[in-house]
Image (cartoon, grey):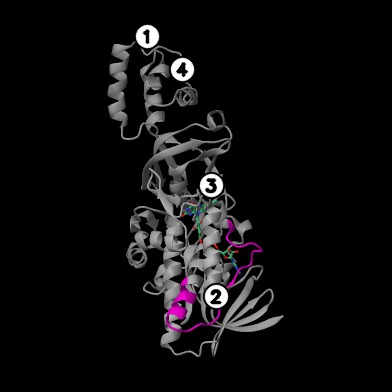
């Protein structure tokens, strides 16, 4: 068992914690002070989530990042994002030796197309800045003391003048982010709003046709209706899978379904498979098609609007004869087909859970922090950053941007506050 004393202890060596540690150590050094910045992580190997991100390529950020790309208090998010912009992020990564490239979607990836480039660069820079990195050190308790904080961890105790909580959320718990950080935050007096999986695929009722379409992707407009009110509408690519639905638009919409389900609110997800076209427009289109091509089959006609396989499945779903000619399709069947095309109710059984969620919705309320510094308003000297906070981004590099930005702010603020407070800095 060891007892050590440090200036800044950062709990969690993910994207946010690594950034915070680097910036804290470099800010202290720039002020002519050198003192220990300690990075503790419960996992044996750090940065696993960075390595698996973006399909192993790490979508570091997006060319345009605005508060609207995040869910949470928009005013606070705007102020936080302004502190460390995309341009500064790109330049910072370049200074680490990681050159980013832009893809047509606006997502930025390392030119190597390898997430390891990002992790290796962050760890190398942290070591160079003098950060002490301790994997396999799970923090089990944090209390305040006359000199700052006392951290209990699996190898002993650490005293720290400043503590940065960067323990992530609950997504992909095997990486070490298992939600225990919320308990640490609560122990220090913070609230934690309900946490649910976000950026998560959805599992459909087994009687549905999804498995037969597995691998097919196409655009759809999704509308989530909670308590009878549309709370979210978005258009994008949906991917049919053996278990249900995935793809960017489903991942982005999933949080509204999980949040509503978590509070037992009635929730439905509807799809318009012909995005941008209303049922009335399609009714007229149908009438024209019937007049112009009366002998064309229903499925062939629908295939003009949606992929062939989906057209077939939709006909079967609403018990309509897919081979019937347009002239044979009854008014009743036409209505059924139109409503299935434009207001398809997905029979959702459940979300795919924490092992498949990319991020957590909910967490420590942003209102409990000073957005200029990420310091807790409740406990002086405590900083909270990254996914532990009640802010989640849509798919596209926004969650990492949140981690880099909040990490940068907290690292700089914690170090500056130490210098300003003239706390005797312990030498490394
Ligand atoms: C499969 C997948 C793909 C993703 N792809 C992208 C992407 O391409 N782009 C993007 O922007 N976002 C992506 N994300 C989301 C992004 O990875 C996270 O939002 C981001 O990593 C959060 O960073 P963080 O530092 O806050 O938390 P984390 O990365 O979760 O790090 C938290 C760290 O804290 C440690 N820890 C937890 N509790 C303790 C404790 N008690 N004591 C000590 N250590 C502890 C954990 O071991 C972990 O290392 C993806 C997520 C997943 C799961």
Mark found first going from the N terminus, 3 or 2? 3
Mark found first going from the N terminus, 3 or 4? 3
SS under mark 3: helix
The nearer-to-camera label among 3 and 2 is: 2
Q: Is mark 3 within 8 Å of ligand 1?
A: yes
Q: Is mark 4 within 8 Å of ligand 1?
A: no
Residue sitting at x 43%, y 88%: 421
Q: Percent position (x, y) of residue 396?
A: 43, 50
Residue 322 is labelled as 4
CB-based contact (under 8 Å), mark 1 and mark 4 = no
Q: Residues within 10 Å of mark 3 (few under 14, many from 20)?
A: few
Would residue 394 be visible to someone looking at this image?
no
Q: Percent position (x, y) of residue 113?
A: 50, 48
Q: Is residue 264 above or below residue 105?
A: below
Q: Is residue 40 magenta?
A: yes
The nearer-to-camera label among 2 and 1 is: 2
- Indicate left or right for 333 with 426 as reference: left
Magenta segment boundaries in residue numbering:
23-48
Gap in Å between the C-alphas at discs 1 and 4? 13 Å
Residue 295 is labelled as 1
Q: Name the quadrant containing residue 85.
A: bottom left
Gap in Å between the C-alphas at discs 3 and 4? 38 Å
Mark found first going from the N terminus, 1 or 4? 1
| Pointer 3 residue | 55
| Pointer 2 residue | 130
Gap in Å between the C-alphas at discs 2 and 4? 68 Å
Q: Name the quadrant containing residue 144.
A: bottom right
């Amino acid at each position: 068992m060891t007892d050590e004393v440090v200036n800044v202890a950062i709990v969690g060596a993910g994207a946010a914690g690594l950034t915070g540690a680097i910036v804290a150590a470099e800010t202290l050094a720039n002020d002519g002070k050198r003192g220990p910045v300690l990075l503790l992580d419960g996992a044996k190997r750090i940065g696993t989530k960075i390595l698996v991100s973006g399909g192993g390529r790490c979508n570091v950020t997006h060319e345009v990042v605005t508060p609207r790309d995040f869910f949470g208090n928009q005013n606070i998010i705007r102020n936080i994002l302004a502190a460390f912009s995309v341009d500064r992020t790109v330049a910072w990564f370049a200074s680490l030796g990681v050159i980013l490239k832009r893809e047509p979607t606006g997502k930025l990836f390392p030119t190597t197309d390898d997430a390891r480039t990002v992790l290796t660069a962050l760890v190398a820079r942290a070591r160079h800045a003098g950060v002490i990195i301790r994997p396999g050190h799970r923090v089990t308790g944090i209390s305040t003391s006359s000199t700052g904080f006392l951290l209990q961890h699996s190898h002993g105790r650490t005293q720290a003048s400043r503590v940065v909580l960067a323990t992530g959320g609950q997504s992909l718990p095997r990486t070490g982010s298992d939600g225990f950080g919320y308990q640490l935050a609560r122990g220090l007096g913070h609230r934690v709003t309900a946490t649910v999986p976000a950026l998560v695929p959805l599992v459909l009722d087994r009687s549905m046709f999804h498995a037969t379409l597995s691998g097919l992707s196409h655009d759809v407009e999704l509308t989530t209706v909670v308590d009878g009110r549309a709370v979210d509408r978005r258009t994008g690519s949906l991917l049919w899978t053996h278990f249900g639905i995935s793809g960017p638009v489903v991942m982005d919409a999933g949080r509204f379904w999980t949040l509503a389900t978590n509070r037992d609110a009635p929730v439905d997800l509807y799809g318009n498979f012909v995005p941008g076209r209303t049922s009335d427009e399609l009714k007229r289109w149908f009438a024209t098609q019937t007049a112009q091509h009366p002998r064309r089959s229903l499925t062939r006609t629908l295939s003009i609007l949606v992929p062939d396989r989906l057209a077939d499945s939709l006909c079967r779903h609403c018990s309509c004869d897919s081979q019937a000619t347009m002239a044979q399709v009854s008014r009743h069947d036409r209505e059924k087909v139109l409503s299935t095309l434009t207001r398809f109710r997905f029979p959702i059984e459940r979300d795919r859970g924490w092992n498949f969620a990319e991020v957590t919705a909910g967490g420590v309320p942003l209102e409990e922090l000073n957005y200029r510094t990420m310091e807790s308003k409740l406990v002086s000297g405590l900083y909270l950053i990254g996914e532990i906070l009640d802010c989640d981004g849509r798919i596209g590099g926004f969650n990492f941007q949140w981690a880099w930005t909040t990490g940068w702010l907290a690292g700089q603020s914690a170090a500056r506050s130490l210098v300003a407070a003239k706390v005797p800095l312990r030498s490394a």
